[in-house]
Image: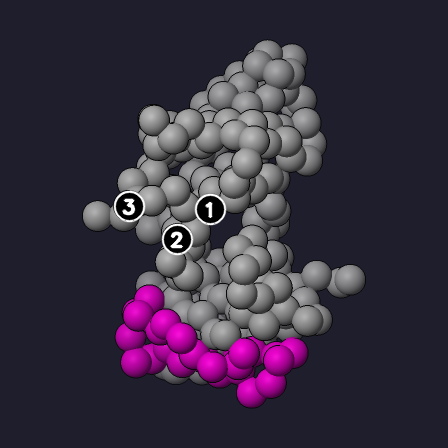
Amino acid sequence: DAGVIQSPRHEVTEMGQEVTLRCKPISGHNSLFWYRQTMMRGLELLIYFNNNVPIDDSGMPEDRFSAKMPNASFSTLKIQPSEPRDSAVYFCASRPGQGAWEQYFGPGTRLTVT
Amino acid sequence: AQSVTQPDIHITVSEGASLELRCNYSYGATPYLFWYVQSPGQGLQLLLKYFSGDTLVQGIKGFEAEFKRSQSSFNLRKPSVHWSDAAEYFCAVGYNNDMRFGAGTRLTVKP
């Protein structure tokens, strides 16, 4: 199995631009999580999906952030408009399903907003 | 309030020395417990997990962890550290369909 795949691995953009991060979970996993990691705040859960349905988006910082999971094999996290304080590493993780707690992480997308 | 605490932000050990990383949790019942490792520029990799049963669990890369209910702790140990173990280590707790990560402990290994 290829594991969780994220793209791009690095993204540099200017303030005000739209940014889209992509994630492909492990095949057969039915829960997907988006995290943000910064030096100041550590690892923060932004949103998670069960069976493509958003369950908890209380960690999404602002309306500028949105996430979708149109099918079981793809999810996006969009920031529009982006701001310098959004600079962070964004991780996607997937989990096999109910009763299986361990999450499997992708390599992350390092976002820099100038 | 529910929480996961890793008291040590940074630990330095000599190569070949033993290691113990601390993790304490505050939950109403015994949660599911995990340790993850993050190497520079990488995602988090699962080292080991505890759900129930034997309180001493073995993981990958020679790591083990012991669950102590009386102390609400799940400390990670390794008898002999290798230079490649230098990384950030995260304790995580799963409870009630929620999962929380500690702030992490950065491990430096001296030659």
Residue at mark 1: B32
**Which residue is at a point 30% across and 70% down the rendered structure image?**
A58
Q: Earlier in the sequence, mark 3 or mark 2?
A: 3
Specify the segment rendered in magenta.
A51-76
Q: Tell me the CA gap for discs 3 and 2.
A: 9 Å
Residue B10 point in image, percent of width and height: 42, 28
Name the colouring of the figure. one colour
Q: Which of marks 1 and 2 is nearer the N terminus?
A: 1
**Which residue is at a point 37% across and 77% down the rendered structure image?**
A65
* Chain letter of disc 3 in the image: B
The answer to whether the residues at label 1 and label 2 have Cβ atoms under 8 Å apart is yes
Q: Amino acid type of disc 2?
A: Tyr
Q: In the picture shown, does residue B79 fall above or below A89?
A: above
> In which quarter of the view is residue B104 placed?
top left
Q: Tell me the CA gap for discs 1 and 2.
A: 6 Å
Say which quadrant the C terminus of chain B sits in.
Answer: top right
Residue at mark 2: B95
